[in-house]
């Protein structure tokens, strides 16, 4: 199957970005280098093409009922123009995906889902749609750009009439960016302040150029998926296929805060209630390497020489000058301050469990 | 870009031979492909390495890559500077970013490596 392309594919190629196959998409992994791009987002601003992400529109008088049934967070709490981090679960409590739910109108919810899961998510929601609601794959109608970093708002302000100061974190407005219709959301996957902008694919190339020009005075840097990964890892944000997947529940992933059992009927609720009563056996933990070596996804975690878990994400934390990672561990070991070892090419390298997130931006 | 007096492999290592000792590193092309290098595991002095077998590990921000020995022999020196400054593989891949010195046990292997012209042609065709 040929690789899928975003509307900015030619721009990435022409600017010499290094490209990789990411879940079937030909995406830029780096422009200037992951470290430089990571630094740009932590200190200034970075621009990402995240048009591979999926979008799903849910319309209709019972759209809220459907959203409440298939997602774990309480969408009834959302005000117009508010977004929330949530998840789709299977009946057995494992993750279908983690998602963002935006309330556009009382009868319209807009979901942003992971690129490689969009077909699966759509089918999952459609299959559980026993409500007076329509589920539409909106992906083809959107390109998505992310401007992230402490100076991101300054960059965007030059290009929009929307009153950005009135848009709080996890809120959004529908407005224009460079006179193109845009859904402008104060969300992101970097641990910094920033914006995710949903636009029509035909506007993507023009806006990409305009944002880079407007951001030049702020030192904006085009960024690839490499930096997106190191940034989200430092901020301990889960990545589907790594920290979360079909065999992991929200309790295990430490995502209790997005599960609102009290809201009533949820697909997967029974399994979650049961697991909560029984107690979980493993939990996601953060760790820092103490010995020389870098943990990578899939490496085994050892305690007293015996295998006790596995690394879900690992690598350098450029802003912290450390090598970090996340892993699943038995409950008693998952608390911060425990000595563990990461098996790096057959050699146990000392590490210690630490609280997450690893990096927290100054407010 | 690629010195005439070096020999190369299709796995993007370079070799410079002086008096039966091969200095070995990765090529400029390799470091570009890997991106920012943050960790290098060099072989222990005294170990015997065999051509085509993994003898070092280079890690970029994104991933770990095995480096295969371009020649066989005994490791007589390893670049200890790489422990503190692995980025030498990015900034000076053909000189200060060398990985190890190997005393050749099969000197005939050198003739089987690529010349700079052949290597550049290989890169161009790839």
Image (cartoon, rainbow, N blue to C red):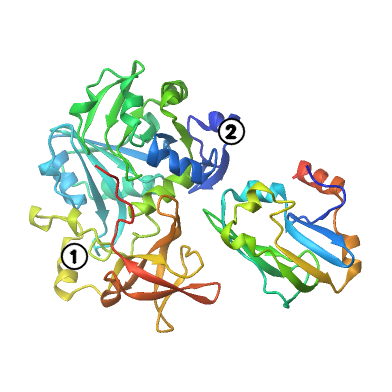
In the depicted structure, whether residue A154 falls above or below residue B47: above
Q: Are marks 2 and 1 on the same chain?
A: yes
**Spatial distance from mark 2 to mark 1, Cα to Cα?**
45 Å
Residue under the image location 43 percent in, 59 percent down: A322
From this viewpoint, is residue A204 visible?
no
Q: Is residue A118 left or right of residue A26?
A: left
Quickly name the residue at label 1. Answer: A272
**Image location of residue A160, percent across then percent down:** 30, 19
Q: In the rendered image, which quarter is residue B97 located in? A: bottom right
Residue under the image location 48 percent in, 34 percent down: A6
> To which chain does the residue with label 2 belong?
A
For disc 1, the neighbor class at 10 Å (few under 14, some 14 to 19, many from 20) is many
Q: In the rendered image, which quarter is residue A270 located in? A: bottom left
Which residue is more in the foreground, A360 or A230? A360
In the rendering, which numbered label is found on residue A13? Answer: 2
Q: Secondary structure at mark 2?
A: helix
Residue under the image location 40 percent in, 48 percent down: A231
**Image location of residue B11, percent across then percent down:** 73, 57
**Image location of residue A274, percent across then percent down:** 16, 70
Q: Quadrant of the N terminus of chain A?
A: top right
């Amino acid at each position: 199957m040929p690789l899928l392309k975003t509307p900015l594919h030619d721009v990435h190629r022409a600017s010499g970005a290094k490209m990789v196959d990411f879940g079937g998409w030909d995406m830029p992994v780096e422009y200037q280098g992951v470290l430089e791009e990571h630094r740009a987002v932590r200190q200034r601003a970075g621009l990402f093409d995240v048009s591979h992400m999926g979008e799903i529109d849910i319309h209709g008088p019972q759209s809220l009922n459907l959203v409440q049934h298939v997602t774990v967070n309480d969408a009834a709490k959302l005000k117009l123009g508010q977004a929330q981090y949530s998840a789709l679960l299977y009946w057995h409590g494992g993750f279908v995906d983690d998602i963002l739910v935006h309330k556009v109108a009382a009868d319209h919810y807009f979901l942003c889902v992971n690129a490689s899961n969009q077909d699966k998510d759509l089918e999952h929601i459609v299959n559980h749609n026993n409500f007076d609601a329509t589920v539409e794959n909106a992906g083809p109608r959107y390109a998505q750009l992310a401007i992230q970093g402490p100076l991101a708002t300054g960059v965007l302000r030059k290009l929009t009439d929307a009153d950005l100061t009135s848009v709080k974190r996890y809120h959004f407005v529908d407005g224009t960016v460079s006179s193109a219709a845009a859904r402008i959301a104060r969300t992101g996957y970097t641990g910094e302040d920033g914006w995710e902008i949903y636009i029509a694919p035909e506007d993507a190339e023009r806006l990409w150029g305009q944002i880079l020009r407007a951001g030049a005075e702020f030192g904006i840097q085009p960024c690839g998926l490499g930096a997106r990964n190191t940034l989200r890892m430092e901020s301990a944000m889960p990545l589907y296929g790594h920290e979360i997947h079909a065999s992991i529940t929200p309790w295990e992933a430490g995502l209790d805060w997005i599960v609102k059992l009290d809201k009533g009927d949820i697909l997967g609720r029974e399994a979650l209630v049961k697991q909560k009563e029984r107690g979980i056996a493993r939990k996601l933990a953060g760790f820092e390497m103490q010995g020389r070596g870098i943990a990578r996804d899939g490496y085994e975690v050892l305690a007293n020489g015996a295998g006790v878990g596995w690394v879900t994400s690992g690598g350098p934390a450029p802003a912290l000058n450390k090598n970090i990672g996340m892993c699943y561990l038995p409950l008693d070991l998952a608390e911060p301050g425990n000595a563990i070892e990461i098996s790096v090419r057959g050699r146990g390298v000392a590490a210690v469990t630490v609280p997450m997130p690893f990096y927290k931006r100054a407010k | 870009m690629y010195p005439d007096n070096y020999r190369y492999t299709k796995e993007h290592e370079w070799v410079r031979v002086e008096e039966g000792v091969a200095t070995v590193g990765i090529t400029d092309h390799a470091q570009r492909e890997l991106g920012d290098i943050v960790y290098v595991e060099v072989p222990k002095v005294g170990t015997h390495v065999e051509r085509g077998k993994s003898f070092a590990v280079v890690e970029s921000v994104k991933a770990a890559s095995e480096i295969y020995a371009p020649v066989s022999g005994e490791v007589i020196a390893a670049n200890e500077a790489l422990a503190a400054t692995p980025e030498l593989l990015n900034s000076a891949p053909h000189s200060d970013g060398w990985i190890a010195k190997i005393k050749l046990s099969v000197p005939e292997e050198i003739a089987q490596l690529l010349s700079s012209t052949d290597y550049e042609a290989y890169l161009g065709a790839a």
